[in-house]
Image (cartoon, helix red, strand yellow):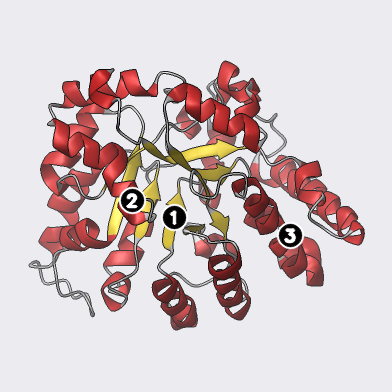
């Protein structure tokens, strides 16, 4: 792989399993029972309401058997070794279970803020083993905007955070969408601190109805659909004028799938600007806002990569390993990078942008 010998590959989507013990070590002893009780309540709700009494999917359906057992899935020392084995310089790291789904007023009452900070501290302690190479996607709550603002300031100041993860579907939490005025202090603070917002692929609450109706053994219908609701999230950011209002703010969509994006913008979003639809605050084609302020990650998708590259250009595309999930290219990322980009017909200079340069710039690593 001589053509990649000096390239600093950056994966903008990797995962770590932060165990209960790892999190509770960062909490006061009195909060341990609060954490455990919230997890029990969340699992009971998932089993009885979301899954409707049907059995949960097996872990093997969501992880690569070899990668999921590697120490890189559990501890920072192992993570760095796994990255070295894969030839990856740096990673943006997401928890297997977003803390914001457990740490909420509904499940923890008045204790939720203290536990939320403890959860982010658990992520920060992981990243502290190499603050440059390990970039945790810190959780950000939307229940209390004053608290969220203070958490952004704390993480940027004390933990050298580079990015924060937000739910792509605030309405699932009974909260207004991103354009609402309640978020103004938060967007201003994120813009001032230069943090990047990450909207990771997630399960919209209404999608669980498909799970309950899906007759296939591994819920193959259900598991193939989570990308589709992200179209709503993209529209809420762009067609409401929110991103244009905060021109320094950047939002990356993680694991959206690439192939549908050119069609979505070319056939649906951009034409609506000239079809008698009114979008207050939107002054440029949606595709231009996406190019300037958004981005999308991908794993192995040569056809979608080719289409997005030709439509958007190279500057808003971000490569990832998705370690340790089934689509991961670990520990053969460098080999796959070469083969995928040759298959997509992308020249070397732009390949370097997509697999390293864009992330080095966005996260201040270059």
Image position of 165 with respect to 211: above or below: below
Q: Residues within 10 Å of mark 1 (few under 14, many from 20)?
A: many
Which is closer to the viewer, label 3 or label 1? 3
Q: Which mark is residue 198?
A: 1
Residue shown at 76%/44% (left/top)? 22
Image position of 120 with respect to 71: above or below: below
Tell whether label 3 touches label 2 (CB within 8 Å): no
Q: In this view of the protein, can residue 319 be seen by the observer?
A: yes
Residue 295 x %, y %? 30, 51
Instruction: Tell which residue pokes out farthest to the front in this image.
Output: 6
Residue shown at 45%/45% (left/top)? 201
Tag 2 secondary structure:
loop
Mark closer to the chain start, 1 or 2? 1
Q: Which mark is residue 118?
A: 3
Please name the residue that numbered disc 2 is placed on. 366
Q: Is residue 145 left or right of residue 187?
A: right
Task: Work out how far the residue at label 2 is from the one at label 3, CA to CA, in angstroms.
Answer: 30 Å
Q: Residues within 10 Å of mark 2 (few under 14, many from 20)?
A: few
Total numbered badges shown on the rendered structure:
3
Residue 365 x %, y %? 38, 51
Residue 340 x %, y %? 25, 23
Task: Work out how far the residue at label 3 is from the one at label 1, CA to CA, in angstroms.
Answer: 20 Å
Residue 173 x %, y %? 59, 63
Which is closer to the viewer, label 2 or label 3? 2
Residue shown at 33%/27% (left/top)? 300
Q: Which of these two is toward me, 335 or 52?
A: 335
Which is closer to the viewer, label 1 or label 2? 2
């Amino acid at each position: 792989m001589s053509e990649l010998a000096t390239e600093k590959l950056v994966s903008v989507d990797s995962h770590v399993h932060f165990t209960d013990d790892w999190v509770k070590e960062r909490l006061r002893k009195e909060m341990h029972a609060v954490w455990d009780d919230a997890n029990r309540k969340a699992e009971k709700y998932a089993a009885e309401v979301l899954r409707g009494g049907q059995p949960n999917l097996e872990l093997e359906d969501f992880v690569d058997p070899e990668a999921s057992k590697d120490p890189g899935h559990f501890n920072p020392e192992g993570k760095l070794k796994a990255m070295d084995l894969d030839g990856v310089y740096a990673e943006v790291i997401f928890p297997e279970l977003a803390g914001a789904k457990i740490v909420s007023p509904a499940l923890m009452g008045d204790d939720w803020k203290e536990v939320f900070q403890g959860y982010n501290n658990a992520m920060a302690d992981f990243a502290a083993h190499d603050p440059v190479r390990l970039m945790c996607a810190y959780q950000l709550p939307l229940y209390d905007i004053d608290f969220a603002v203070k958490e952004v300031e704390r993480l940027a100041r004390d933990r050298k955070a580079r990015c924060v993860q937000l739910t792509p579907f605030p309405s699932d939490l009974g909260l207004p969408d991103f354009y609402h005025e309640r978020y103004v202090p938060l967007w201003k603070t994120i813009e001032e601190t230069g943090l990047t917002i990450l909207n990771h692929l997630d399960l919209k609450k209404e999608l669980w109805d498909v799970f309950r109706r899906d007759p296939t053994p591994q819920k193959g219908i259900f598991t193939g659909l989570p990308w589709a609701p992200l179209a709503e999230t993209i529209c809420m950011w762009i067609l409401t004028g929110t991103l244009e209002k905060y021109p320094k703010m950047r939002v990356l969509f993680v694991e959206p799938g690439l192939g549908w994006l050119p069609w979505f913008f070319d056939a649906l979003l951009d034409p609506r600007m000239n079809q008698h639809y009114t979008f207050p605050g939107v002054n440029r084609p949606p595709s231009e806002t996406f190019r300037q302020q958004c981005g999308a990650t991908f794993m192995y998708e040569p056809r979608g990569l080719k289409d997005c590259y030709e439509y958007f250009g190279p500057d808003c595309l971000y490569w990832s390993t998705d370690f340790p999930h089934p689509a991961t290219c670990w520990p053969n990322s460098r080999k796959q990078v070469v083969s995928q980009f040759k298959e997509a017909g992308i020249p070397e200079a732009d390949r370097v942008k997509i697999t390293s340069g864009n992330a080095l710039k966005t996260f201040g690593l270059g």
